[in-house]
Amino acid sequence: MADESVDLKLAVYAERLDRYIESQSELNKTLTQTLNRLDTELTDIKEWRNRVYGAKASIVAVGVLLLHTIVVLGGITGLISWVYNR
């Protein structure tokens, strides 16, 4: 009788352990899929960040070019008006 009780408890324990291992395996699969999706999303965010930085750099370059053009044309205009008004 005692052996049957031990065998029964062992069988119940083994079944519970199998269910636990199975649920942990499913959890690991789910976590792996989630981490892979997050990795993909992070890569997409980094690509967009690089595009935004590129756009900012382009805008700054165009602004500097525009400012330089205004200064040079202003200097030429000032020089011409100075020469003609002497």
Image: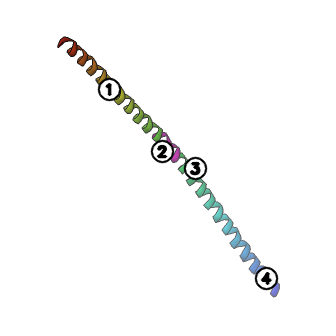
Could you tell whether 66 is left or right of 81 in the image? right
Magenta residues span: 41-48
Q: Which residue does the numbered mark 1 point to in the structure image?
A: 66
Q: CA distance from mark 4 to mark 1?
A: 88 Å
The secondary element bearing badge 3 is classed as: helix
Q: Nearer the viewer, residue 21 or 73?
A: 73
Q: CA distance from mark 4 to mark 2?
A: 57 Å
Amino acid type of the residue tagged 2 in the rendering: Ile
Could you tell whether 21 is left or right of 48 in the image? right
Determine crowd level at label 1: few under 14, some 14-19, many 20+ residues with C-alpha closer than 10 A: few
Residue drawn 57% across the image and 53% down it: 35
The image quadrant of residue 10 is bottom right
| Outermost bottom residue | 1
The secondary element bearing badge 1 is classed as: helix
Q: Nearer the viewer, residue 23 or 74?
A: 74
Chain-order first, disc 2 or disc 3: 3
Residue 83 magenta: no
Residue drawn 38% across the image and 33% down it: 60
Question: Does residue 22 lie above or below 48 as drawn?
Answer: below
Q: Which residue does the numbered mark 2 point to in the structure image?
A: 45
Chain-order first, disc 4 or disc 2: 4
Q: CA distance from mark 2 to mark 3?
A: 14 Å
The secondary element bearing badge 2 is classed as: helix
Between circles 2 and 1, the one closer to the viewer is: 1
Residue drawn 23% across the image and 14% down it: 80
Q: Which residue does the numbered mark 3 point to in the structure image?
A: 36
Q: CA distance from mark 3 to mark 1?
A: 45 Å
The image quadrant of residue 23 is bottom right
Q: Which mark is residue 6?
A: 4
Determine crowd level at label 3: few under 14, some 14-19, many 20+ residues with C-alpha closer than 10 A: few
Query: Where's the C terminus, which quadrant?
Result: top left
